[in-house]
Image (spheres, rainbow, N blue to C red):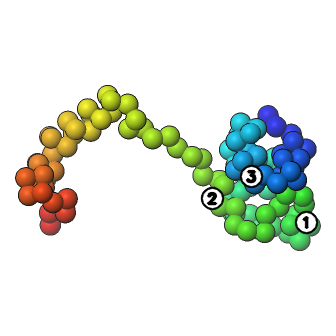
């Protein structure tokens, strides 16, 4: 687990939370929490004294609280499964025959 000092040192070197977190092997929201003691989800009110802590962002931090996800459809087995699902869906078959991707009402 990175320390507060490690996160703050990377921020002081010019990195943003995303880059610092990547270098430390944690999420940006976790790096923010480590550095500031405040959650990145924006759910808490920040007091004047908390706002003065090193590393506290003046901008919204909400985006940092969402973990990045990997693309689950990268494997051929997933592509085969998706094709099978589309073939077994009547509405999708009709849309493919018409050459349109619009929903049927």
Taking the spot 12% from the left edge, 57% from the top edge, the residue there is 99
Taking the spot 88% from the left edge, 53% from the top edge, the residue there is 12
Which of the numbered marks, if any, corresponds to residue 17?
3
In the image, residue 85 sits, relative to residue 35, either above or below, namely above
Which of the numbered marks, if any, corresponds to residue 52?
1
Task: Mark 2 vs mark 3: give the one in front.
Answer: 3
- Crowding at mark 3 (Cα within 10 Å: few <14, some 14-19, many 20+): many
Q: Quadrant of the C terminus?
A: bottom left
Which of 40/23 is in front? 23
The reply to whether callout 1 and callout 3 are in contact (CB within 8 Å) is no
Q: Earlier in the sequence, mark 2 or mark 3?
A: 3
Which residue bears the numbered disc 2? Answer: 63
**Residue 50 visible to an observer of this rendering:** yes
The reply to whether callout 2 and callout 3 are in contact (CB within 8 Å) is no
Q: Residue lying farthest front?
A: 14
Task: Mark 1 vs mark 3: give the one in front.
Answer: 3
Per the model, the C-alpha gap separating discs 2 and 1 is 21 Å
Per the model, the C-alpha gap separating discs 2 and 3 is 11 Å
């Amino acid at each position: 687990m990175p320390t507060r000092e490690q996160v703050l040192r990377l921020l002081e070197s010019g990195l943003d939370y995303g880059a610092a977190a990547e270098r430390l092997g944690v999420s940006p929201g976790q790096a923010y929490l480590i550095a500031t003691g405040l959650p990145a989800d924006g759910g808490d009110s920040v007091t004047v004294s908390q706002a003065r802590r090193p590393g506290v962002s003046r901008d919204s931090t909400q985006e940092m609280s969402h973990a990045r996800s990997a693309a689950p459809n990268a494997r051929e087995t997933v592509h085969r499964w998706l094709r099978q699902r589309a073939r077994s869906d009547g509405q999708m078959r009709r849309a493919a025959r018409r050459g349109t991707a619009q929903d049927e009402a």
